[in-house]
Image (cartoon, rainbow, N blue to C red):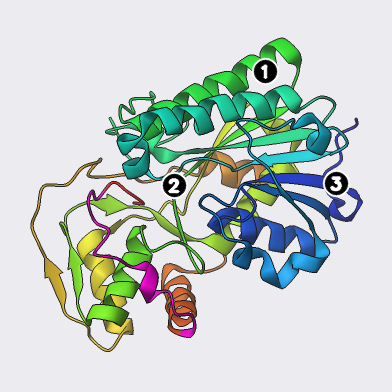
Amino acid sequence: MGYQMKNWDKKRVVVTGAAGFLGSHLCESLVSKGTEIIALDNLMIGSIANLEPIRNKIQIISCDITKDDLQAFIKDSHVVFHLAALASPRMCKNNFDLAFDINIRGTKNVLSACTGQELVIFMSAAPVYGDPLYVPIDEKHPLNGKDPYSITKIIGEYLCHSYYQNYGVPIVIVRNFNVFGPRQVPEYLIPTLITQALSKNKIEIWSSQPHRDFMFVDNTIDAWLKISENPEFIGDIVNVGSGIEIQIGDLAKRVSEMMAGTPVIDLNKEVIGSMRLVCNNEKLKQKTGWTPKISLEEGLRKTIEWYKAHSFEEMHSGSHLEELGNGI
């Protein structure tokens, strides 16, 4: 197939993990462009409710990437976005076998089913860098991730390189930094802060010290689409993040100020994970002209409004801060 990704309305796109936080936002964006979407998900983590607004505009298929015949779903597509993964570092650590099965064997199965596509996007993540040797982190930074989640993503990346080099699968590896927004499960940091304020009238953080790079989901999806439209990225790796760091204590204070001054309690516990993860997004900007359109403050407001409008505090059992690296 020839590479011409500008006309999304003429494309048939497969999204694995479509019912998850990121997958559902991607599907919504593609629907707005008139794209034909095959949404694959086993609903182990994702929720069909996330796709409800566009349910009649896409084809939703219950699918297990570790077991099912993916060729039948993928064979006639132009583009594949592979998002399906066990993405919680805590869950991966607690069940490495499951993480290996989904993130490695599942990824191999998806790649094996890709024959004749114009583009395959593999979603990796900033934790593959491990404790950074320098910040902001560019794509040339060594892969020093050591926890089970990071290891499965690193192996997934190597699988992508192999399928690109040996079988000609046109792959782009996207390393996402921290994304937040409506529909994200409360296990992740920003939803944790919001749901604590709503349900407990207080915000507890393990430590105010770490720095992270948070970006609103709409900006992330916009970056993904711009990457997809540029053939220069095929066979390459690109970071997606805001390039702006914020200390967790300052982030908690901002959420507090937006939620009637909910008190913030710093537990001063030892954290698991890197103290600083900040994205160098120069490659993305230079090759696509992308810039984030929604600020952190506006994104926080939109996310808070969504949680207030939806009864998701019942999903919030405890603080979900077993490890600070989980979700941030």
Label 3 SS? strand
Q: Residues within 10 Å of mark 1 (few under 14, many from 20)?
A: some
Is residue 81 something one can see in this rendering?
yes
Residue 146 in the image, given as x and y percentages of width and height? 30, 26
Q: State which region is magenta.
A: 309-324
- Residue at 33% from the left image edge and 68% from the top image edge: 316
Residue 311: in magenta span: yes
> Along the horizontal axis of the image, is 28 left or right of 262?
right
The image quadrant of residue 70 is top right
Residue carrying label 3: 12
Q: Amino acid at mark 2?
A: Phe
User: Considering only vertical position in the picture, is 77 above or below 7?
Assistant: above
Q: Residues within 10 Å of mark 2 (few under 14, many from 20)?
A: many
Q: Amino acid at mark 3?
A: Arg
Q: Which residue is at the far bottom?
A: 260
User: Considering only vertical position in the picture, is 96 above or below 193?
Assistant: above
The mark nearer the N terminus, 2 or 1, is 1
Which quadrant is the N terminus positioned in? top right
Residue carrying label 2: 177
Which dot, 2 or 3, sits closer to the camera? 3
Q: Amino acid at mark 1?
A: Tyr
Label 1 SS? helix
